[in-house]
């Protein structure tokens, strides 16, 4: 028999089992059989199966629980259920748990073959995403984790552009991993054995940032007692990552344009151009095109930077990656590697919109791992209150139904205020003073609103 994918068949009905086995043999697949759900799970723990074909009615375990246990053991295994009845509620539950598909009895061999082929193709796509996550790593042993279509596109772009020497612009919200992507691009390039330097352009004043980037000559200003090498020089033959480049002034942008265009600059207080061989990667959490339209960012610099753009999707647009990220954070944490998470806790996390993205998720998971203590299992009670009490929708389910206009408006405003406060406090790590300043609200008024919605600042400190 030709070498092929491994498939596990779980069915106690002889006629059905014979039909499945005959179909799989004709396709050249390797397969094993199990007479019960428990025996199937034992086999899955000892061997990798690409697809499981299972009877939906098993005497020892319900299909929902079986599917959950399969997913805990192997995320890449696709489950196909065989059924001779229609149950809408059960169907919805299984879809929620990640079932691949159904096959209604009685079925033809060709129907089964086509469905198995599609399931295997889906598994190959998952493997590619996993392979990318493992391959796209830096010498700092850091990974990009994701199996969603959105992240697979990012993986593909990274692999294509890493070998080039062109300028890269990474755009994405705070906490999506822009610096991580920049470091991985560097480590996949021919410059990987040279320096990778990073500077946060938003953290320094214009004059300090210019000195840091370009360096300065002795006597350029009071206190400049010797010549200082800037980051462009220090990153010679390597990569310089300009984080949050949108926060630079138009004056400094003009000087950056010269480096991007000609790979040369002049030190502060100097007159002689200095040539440099450095790859530039820039990032921003803003819409840089919109900044250009508003006159806050130079159009010529934008087009020089935007040669190879990468957009990192926010976590709310790739929620299927959340279970994978949870497992990764726990496994990589060391002391919490044996901590598990309940399905209800995962459900709470999937409802949340994650304004802080992957960084926020990591903080929440590690905090929950600490709180779960000796139980070694994260349940909803270990999650922050603002997450576990979140409803499925930011707006009331009855927002458009059977409500007078004023009541509907009142509920919409309350939903907005609650969500705004949650995002505001997360962004400022629970610091009410900073939050009130950013929101341009007085501290007493902000406290009053927090009390109204039972929001506590300490829940957002990490």
Image (tube, grey):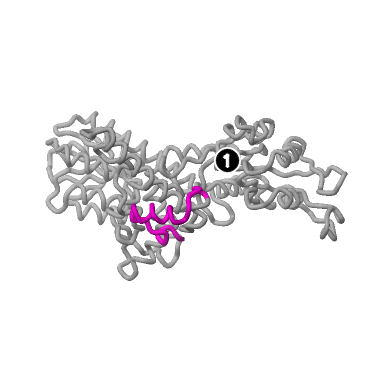
Magenta span dominant secondary structure:
helix
- In the visual, does 448 lie left or right of 24? right
Residue 455 falls inside the magenta stretch:
yes
Q: How many marks?
A: 1
Q: Position of residue 364 (x, y in %)?
A: 41, 57
Binning the other alpha carbons within 10 Å of mark 1 as few (below 14), some (14 to 19) or many (20 upward) gives many
Task: Please state which of residues 164 and 459 is positioned toward the viewer in this rendering.
Answer: 459
Task: Please state which of residues 229 and 10 is positioned toward the viewer in this rendering.
Answer: 229
Residue to which mark 1 is pinned:
170
- Residue 350 lies, with reference to residue 169, above or below; the image says below
What's the residue at 79%, 54% (across, down)? 229
Task: Please state which of residues 449 and 301 is positioned toward the viewer in this rendering.
Answer: 449
Residue 302 falls inside the magenta stretch:
no
Residue 243 visible in the displayed image: yes
- Residue 2 lies, with reference to residue 187, above or below; the image says above
Residue 231 visible in the displayed image: no
Look at the image and tell me in which quarter the N terminus lies.
top left
- Residue 64 lies, with reference to residue 18, above or below; the image says below
Q: Position of residue 431 (x, y in %)?
A: 48, 58
- In the visual, does 14 lie left or right of 134? left
Task: Please state which of residues 165 and 455 is positioned toward the viewer in this rendering.
Answer: 455
What's the residue at 76%, 51% (across, down)? 211
Q: Position of residue 425 (x, y in %)?
A: 45, 53
Which image quarter: residue 277?
Answer: top right
- In this picture, which residue range is highlighted in magenta? 438-462
- In the visual, does 321 lie left or right of 178? left
Label 1 element class: strand
What's the residue at 72%, 42% (across, down)? 252
Q: Residue furthest bottom?
A: 374
């Amino acid at each position: 028999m030709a070498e092929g994918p491994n498939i596990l068949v779980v069915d106690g009905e002889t006629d059905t089992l014979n039909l499945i086995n005959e179909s799989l043999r004709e396709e050249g697949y390797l397969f094993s059989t199990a007479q019960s759900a428990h025996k199937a799970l034992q086999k899955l723990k000892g061997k990798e199966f690409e697809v499981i074909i299972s009877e939906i009615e098993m005497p020892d375990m319900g299909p929902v629980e079986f599917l959950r246990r399969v997913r805990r053991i192997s995320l890449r295994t696709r489950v196909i259920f065989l059924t001779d009845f229609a149950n809408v509620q059960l169907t919805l539950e299984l879809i929620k748990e990640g079932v691949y598909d159904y096959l209604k009895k009685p079925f033809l061999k060709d129907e089964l073959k086509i469905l198995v082929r599609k399931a295997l193709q889906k598994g190959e796509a998952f493997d590619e995403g996993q392979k990318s996550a493992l391959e796209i790593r830096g010498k700092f042993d850091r990974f990009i984790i994701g199996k969603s279509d959105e992240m697979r596109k990012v993986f593909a772009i990274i692999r294509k552009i890493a070998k080039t020497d062109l300028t890269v612009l990474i755009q994405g919200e705070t906490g999506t991993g822009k610096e991580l992507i920049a470091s991985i691009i560097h480590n996949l390039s021919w410059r990987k054995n040279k320096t990778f330097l990073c500077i946060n352009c938003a953290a320094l004043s214009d004059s300090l940032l210019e000195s840091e980037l370009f360096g300065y000559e002795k006597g350029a200003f009071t206190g400049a007692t010797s010549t200082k090498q800037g980051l462009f020089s220090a990153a010679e033959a390597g990569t310089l990552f300009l984080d949050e480049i949108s926060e630079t002034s138009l004056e400094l942008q003009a000087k950056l344009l010269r480096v991007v265009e000609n790979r040369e600059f002049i030190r502060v207080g100097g007159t002689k151009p200095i040539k440099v061989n450095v790859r530039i990667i820039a990032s921003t959490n803003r819409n840089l095109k919109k900044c250009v339209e508003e006159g806050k960012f130079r159009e010529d610099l934008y087009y020089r930077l935007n040669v190879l753009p990468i957009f990192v999707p926010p976590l709310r647009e790739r929620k299927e990656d959340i279970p994978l990220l949870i497992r990764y954070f726990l496994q990589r944490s060391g002391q919490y590697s044996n901590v598990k998470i309940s399905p209800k806790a995962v459900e709470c996390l999937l409802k949340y919109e994650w304004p802080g993205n992957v960084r926020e998720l990591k903080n929440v998971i590690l905090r929950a791992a600490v709180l779960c203590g000796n139980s070694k299992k994260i349940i909803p009670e270990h999650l922050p209150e603002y997450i576990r009490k979140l409803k499925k929708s930011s707006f009331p389910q009855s927002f458009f139904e059977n409500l007078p206009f004023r009541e509907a408006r009142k509920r919409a405003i309350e939903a907005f205020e609650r969500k705004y406060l949650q995002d505001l406090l997360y962004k400022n790590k629970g610091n009410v003073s900073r939050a009130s300043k950013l929101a341009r609200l007085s501290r007493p008024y902000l406290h009053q609103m927090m009390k109204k919605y039972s929001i506590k600042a300490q829940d957002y400190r990490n």
